[in-house]
Amino acid sequence: MWYGVSVLFEAVKMPQPQEEDVVWEECVYLVKASSALEATEAGVRIGKQNEHEYEAAAGNQVRWTFRQIGEVYEIIDETVQNETEVFSRYLRPRQVKSLLAPFEEGPDIARPIGDGSRK
């Protein structure tokens, strides 16, 4: 079976992070597993493998740390192909407002452009 595994990462600016400097990222990974538990375990492995640190464009260090698995979603379609729905959820109006709100001031966490990877 296929699962969508929501993995939550936290980014902090170093060396002395402030509360307002913390940014979270939710990444949904497509995982082939025999059960939701196995998919969760794969998500934890993926999360830990994708922890990293780098110098942002502003010159500060940024550390991305795996924090937890958000949710695990079973993909209903048996065959995953182009345009297969892999993630869907119901949202309350306040959640939509939060999702659509841009950062008022860009956090100094931007990854280097063009490397094509999380690491």
Image (cartoon, rainbow, N blue to C red):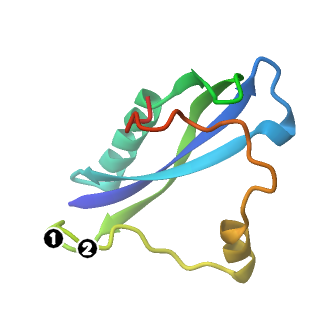
Kind of residue indicated by mark 1: Glu
Q: Position of residue 63 (x, y in %)?
A: 63, 26
Secondary structure at numbered mark 1? loop
**Which residue, given by chain and number where applicable, does mark 2 sit on?**
83
Name the N-terminal-most of marks 2 and 1: 1
Image quadrant where one finds the C terminus: top left
Left or right side of 41 for 1: left
Badge 2: residue crowd in 10 Å (few <14, some 14–19, many ≥20): few
- Residue 18 picture location, percent across and down: 85, 32
Q: Which numbered disc, 2 or 1, marks the residue closer to the eye?
A: 2
**Residue 6, position as x, y percentages in the image:** 47, 54
Amino acid type of the residue that numbered disc 2 sits on in the rendered structure: Glu
Q: Position of residue 61 (x, y in %)?
A: 67, 21
User: Mark 1 sits on what residue?
Assistant: 78
Q: Is residue 9 left or right of residue 115?
A: right
In the rendered image, the vertical position of residue 54 relative to residue 95, given as above or below: above
Q: Residue at x 21, y 74 (%)?
A: 77
